Each structure stands twice: as structure tokens, then as C-alpha cells.
Image (cartoon, rainbow, N blue to C red):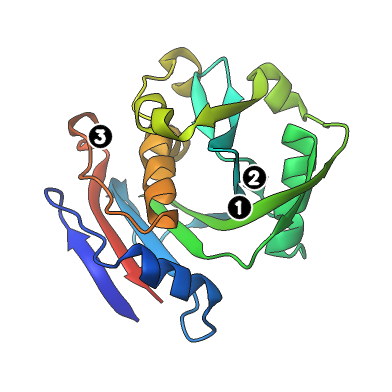
């Protein structure tokens, strides 16, 4: 693989142009882009792994997010991949359940690997087009967290994904989950920038106590 960026914190640059990204999305020679986030606290080797699939959905200059109102947390639609489920099918199912939309995902273009404490968090991202609408089907946790499908204007993404979350709910989970949630806005903003072929920003000051390093590479 080719590594395009690595830092133990200060300056992170994704050194390819938007034209290269477009070429990547259509080329069979390049498999996927990988964003690796290493936590300050992590077990080597990790003991458990959680695999998920997420959708990047843009329409008329707005991006769709699953807004967890209790936490004030914005996530791209998606969730855990069920046993035996294909990534693309997981994306379709999660978009139906969380947002009440029928989507057609492209081949995943990005995988995010996060390592916190005992757990390895893996999320595959696909750019999706909307094909129709259906009834949503929230699970108990999504109801408790007050999930609301929310469209955000592209020019507002940076501000929205820099906003603070409600920590009262977050602190009740495992330490690995707390780190994953705490860093989720930064992760989602990096994913958006990578999807546009743009540089990703340095780790914010308020996350440097949870993130040791970040790396972007083509694999």
C-alpha cells in the first residue's frame, strides 16, 4: 500500500487531488482508502472487534446524518454489520431502519480503523444515491437516544461537527465506547473531507488526550 500521511499529531495532509479521488473511485487498481486512528489507550493485540457500514448521502448540497438528540451527536447513517451480511446490504438495511430511505451504495471507498482500549472499531463507508422511501424501524437504543434523520448544508458541516456533545449519556459506556463516541465528530468530518479529496485537519486540542496518532493511506 501507499502511505500518504502519518503524524503523532501536528500536521496531517492528504496529498492527492480531487481528480485522483475521482480516478480512485472508478479504478479497479486501487482498492480502498484507509483512515487509521490510534487511541492513547489501546491493547496490543486488541481483544474484540466491531464491524460497521456507513453511508455518505448528499442531495442538493446537503448531507444526511443520523442525529442522536440526547447526545447531540451527528453520525453518518449506519451501524453494525450482522453475521454473514455483505457491507452493501448492511448499508441498505441501516438506511432503511434509521432514515426511512432506500439507497443504492457504491463499492466502499474508505475504511476507518479505530483502536481504543481492548476494541478495534471498523467502519466501511460507501457513497450512496437515494432510490426511494420507506418506513423507518428504530431499535430500542435509537429510540432512547432520540434519533432524528437530519440534513445539513455542506457549508455548515465543519461547524456542526465541531460542536460539543452531551456527556451525561456517554460516560455510562465502556471506556472504548466513550473514546469512540468522543472522537466520532472528528472522524466523520475527516471522512467527509477524504470523500471530497481534501486535506484532513490536525487532531483538535480537546481530543489529544484520546488520540495518539492518525494515518491516511491507499491500500
List the single residue furthest toward the bottom. Answer: 29
Q: Which mark is residue 79?
A: 2
As measured in the structure, the alpha-carbon distance from the residue carrying label 3 to the one carrying label 1 is 23 Å
Quadrant position of residue 149: top right
As measured in the structure, the alpha-carbon distance from the residue carrying label 3 to the one carrying label 2 is 23 Å
Residue shown at the point (63%, 20%) measured from the top left: 145
Quadrant position of residue 106: bottom right
As measured in the structure, the alpha-carbon distance from the residue carrying label 1 to the one carrying label 2 is 5 Å
Q: Residues within 10 Å of mark 3 (few under 14, many from 20)?
A: some
**Residue 19, position as x, y percentages in the image:** 38, 69
**Element marked by disc 2:** strand
Left or right of 83? Residue 110 is: left
Residue bearing the label numbered 1: 52
Q: For the N terminus, which image quadrant?
A: bottom left
List the single residue furthest toward the right. Answer: 135
Q: Residues within 10 Å of mark 1 (few under 14, many from 20)?
A: many
Q: Which mark is residue 106?
A: none
Residue shown at the point (42%, 20%) measured from the top left: 165
Left or right of 110? Residue 211 is: left
List the single residue furthest toward the left. Answer: 10
**Element marked by disc 3:** helix
Left or right of 57? Residue 217 is: left
Residue bearing the label numbered 3: 207
**Residue 219, position as x, y percentages in the image:** 41, 77
Tag 1 near tag 2, CB within 8 Å: yes
Quadrant position of residue 45: bottom left
Residue 82 in sight in this render: no
**Residue 197, position as x, y percentages in the image:** 36, 59
Amino acid at each position: 500500500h501507499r502511505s500518504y500521511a502519518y503524524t503523532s499529531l501536528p500536521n496531517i495532509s492528504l496529498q492527492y487531488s480531487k481528480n485522483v479521488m475521482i480516478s480512485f473511485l472508478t479504478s479497479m487498481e486501487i482498492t480502498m482508502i484507509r483512515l487509521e486512528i490510534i487511541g492513547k489507550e489501546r491493547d496490543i493485540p486488541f481483544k474484540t472487534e466491531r464491524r460497521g457500514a456507513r453511508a455518505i448521502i448528499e442531495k442538493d448540497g446537503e448531507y444526511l446524518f443520523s442525529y442522536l438528540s440526547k447526545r447531540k451527536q451527528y453520525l453518518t447513517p449506519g451501524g453494525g454489520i450482522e453475521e454473514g451480511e455483505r457491507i452493501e446490504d448492511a448499508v441498505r438495511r441501516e438506511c432503511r431502519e434509521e432514515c426511512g430511505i432506500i439507497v443504492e451504495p457504491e463499492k466502499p471507498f474508505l475504511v476507518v480503523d479505530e483502536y481504543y482500549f481492548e476494541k478495534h472499531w471498523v467502519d466501511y463507508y460507501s457513497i450512496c444515491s437515494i432510490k426511494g422511501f420507506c418506513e423507518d424501524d428504530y431499535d430500542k437504543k435509537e429510540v432512547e437516544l432520540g434519533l432524528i434523520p437530519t440534513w445539513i448544508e455542506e457549508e455548515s458541516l465543519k461547524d456542526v461537527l465541531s460542536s460539543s456533545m452531551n456527556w451525561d449519556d456517554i460516560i455510562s459506556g465502556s471506556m472504548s465506547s466513550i473514546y469512540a463516541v468522543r472522537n466520532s465528530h472528528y472522524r466523520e468530518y475527516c471522512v467527509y473531507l477524504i470523500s471530497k479529496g481534501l486535506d484532513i485537519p490536525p487532531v483538535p486540542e480537546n481530543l489529544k488526550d484520546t488520540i495518539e496518532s492518525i494515518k491516511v493511506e491507499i491500500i
